[in-house]
Image (tube, rainbow, N blue to C red):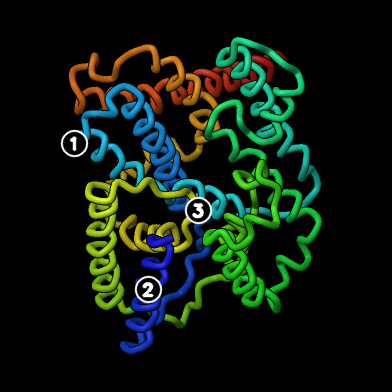
Amino acid sequence: MEWELLGIILTGLAALYLWVFRIPYSIPHPLAAKQGRETRFDVLRGFAMVGIVLIHIHSYFQFFHPADQSVIRTTLFFSNLSRFSVPMFILTSAIFLRKKEGYWNSKLKNLVLPYTLASGIGYLVKYNHYNILEFIQFYFLGKVFAPFYFVPLLIQFYVLFYLFDKILTYKLFSRSLLLISLLLNLSSNLGLLDSILPKDYHSISILNYIFFFVFGIYIGLFYEKKDQTTKKGGVSLLFGTLTLLFLFFLILFSFDHVVDFKNHHLVYPIFFFFGVWEILPTFNRKISEWISYIGNNSLFIFLLHPFIIHLMHSVDPYSFGGPILGYIVTLILNVGIPIIIAFTIQKGKSLYRLRHSDER
């Protein structure tokens, strides 16, 4: 709650800064005119996927070395730094969402089916005593592995969009919906809605992320105003100042107060979104392509990485060469192995299509 209120104060200061110095800031649109899809969204998803892995690496190190406080507080810092990840996935998933023919076919094929297979195999691997009712509960609440809650959460948003797409995409209502979703999300984050909702539903409550979903739809509705030029110097100064403030408080909460942040704080993910949006054009192109590739294959990493980190709980991370090297090796394994599997499957599909096209 303290971090949430701190974020609101910092946002207020940022808004005041933009207003006082009359600095316009146009919302970035996913489609750049005459250039096709805006690839920076894929890079953002890549950052988010790596962030999710970093959150779970902290739990892995804490499992083996809870008494090694210097290491645990460092891994906690990287975990807290990565708490933009789930909101970022929700936001970027909403940006390109459209209700069209085959809406559910693509969702079932590309999300529900892989999730069902991963949940079934994961349940057999992780648990010793099997119970069909327990599996059904775990499946619908995303509890087979801790990060799997994201899939039931995302499916709820897809259902919400399918039922109310005309309202959600009606430009006249867009700003009002954005404000309502902000108030709902804030109320949920502050625990004001906990007594209304069933306890088991709290972890997959769409109210925890409703603002990011509506904000993603909002971004998808509006192009940047061509006559609106952003004063780069003022914006850079603003983001630079806020970055220093956020880093200061992240260090304070992680190393001194030892607070493990939640995934659904409001302000930090939005700050990260706009901040990285400004920085990305200066990134090394090769690095951006690699991160974008991770973003494009995020589902493989998301579903397979929990298996890897679960199996690694039988191996002390320090056995890879100490805490620093162990952290790096753990990150590489949890991102690299799913990427290799994704590349192999995609290469196999391409060869299969090529062979069949030659036969025709």
Q: Which mark is residue 9?
A: 2
Mark 2 vs 1: CB contact within 8 A: no
Residue picked out by circle 3: 264
Q: Earlier in the sequence, mark 2 or mark 3?
A: 2
Residue picked out by circle 1: 70
Q: Is 33 above or below relative to 358? A: below
Instruction: Indicate the position of residue 28 as horizontal and vertical percent values.
Output: 47, 66
Visible residue check, residue 154: no
Residue for point 50% across, 53% down: 264
Q: Quadrant of residue 13?
A: bottom left
Instruction: Indicate the position of residue 189 as horizontal and vertical percent values.
Output: 53, 59
- Whole-Å distance between the Cαs marked 2 and 1? 30 Å
Q: Which-is-in-front pick, marks 2 and 1? A: 1
Please tell me how crowded label 3 is: few (under 14), some (14-19), or many (20+) other residues with Cα within 10 Å. Answer: many
Name the amino acid, label 3.
Answer: His
- Whole-Å distance between the Cαs marked 1 and 3? 26 Å
